[in-house]
Image: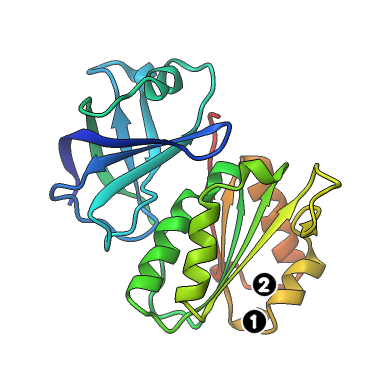
Amino acid sequence: MIQNLELPVIEVNQETPTIKSIKLEKNSLGYKPGQYAIVELETGDEENTHPLSIASSPTEDFLLFSTKISESSFKKKYSQLKIGDKVKIKGPMGMFVLREDAKNIVFLGGGIGITPFRDMIKYATDKKLQIKLTLMYSNRVPAEICYRGEWDLWQKQNPNLKVINTITDDPSWQGRKGRISEQMIKEFCSDLNNTLFYICGPPAMVEGLSQLLKLMNIPQQNIKIEKFAGY
């Protein structure tokens, strides 16, 4: 059921040089891992209203939203939010949700497209779901890896979770380099036909990875996408 709520900001965090998070008091919002809400920063002003994925799991006692700061009116107002400010949200919405009965899930994310994956992975970890989870997360530089400390912690807590950070624009990075590719997917996913693929990120990345999976003969019903337009 969609609710209209006005909730106070209880925490503000700079996740990366370009991504800022706010935590809101949780209140009564019931949602499924992966859903989003419409966030309104100024009543009745469409410019200051924006859909944002809920980055917190339903198992957590706060609502987390993270977004990439830009010059848009909404993003400027968002970046100025402080503890105690009230934020209106309408939700939950969306069908990009965790399939709790899945055996294998591969998350393919880029940049701020990581937000619904944080929600789903934290939920599966807290609920001890027996799903093999693989996250492939692409960023230009290591400083832009959002929630980096949490990925390290949750891999220790969840033996079914594997996180692969891949960096495209920093030759000094010691880990995986380059864009998410067919070779990378096959390296970390041995059962392609029985795996659900979730893709989230900038529209061009989502489109490219969708086409790649189709060329790899992944069944269409096993590909779930969410495009983050309007950076």
Q: Position of residue 123 (x, y in %)?
A: 36, 66
| Direction right: furthest residue | 171
Quick one: 20 or 35, which is closer to the camera? 20
Residue 4 appears at what percent x and percent y? 16, 37
The image quadrant of residue 199 is: bottom right
Work out whether residue 170 or residue 213 is closer to the camera in this orientation and state it: 170
- What residue sits right under mark 1 in the picture? 193
Task: Please indicate whether residue 143 sits to the left or right of residue 87 in the image.
Answer: right
- Badge 2: residue crowd in 10 Å (few <14, some 14–19, many ≥20): some
Disc 1 residue type (three-letter): Asn
- Say whether disc 1 or disc 2 marks the residue closer to the N-terminus: 1
* Residue named by callout 2: 218
Tell me if residue 216 comes above or below residue 227 in the rendering.
below
Q: Is residue 85 above or below residue 121?
A: above
| Left or right: 177 in relation to 113 | right
Of 157 and 114, which appears nearest the observer?
A: 157
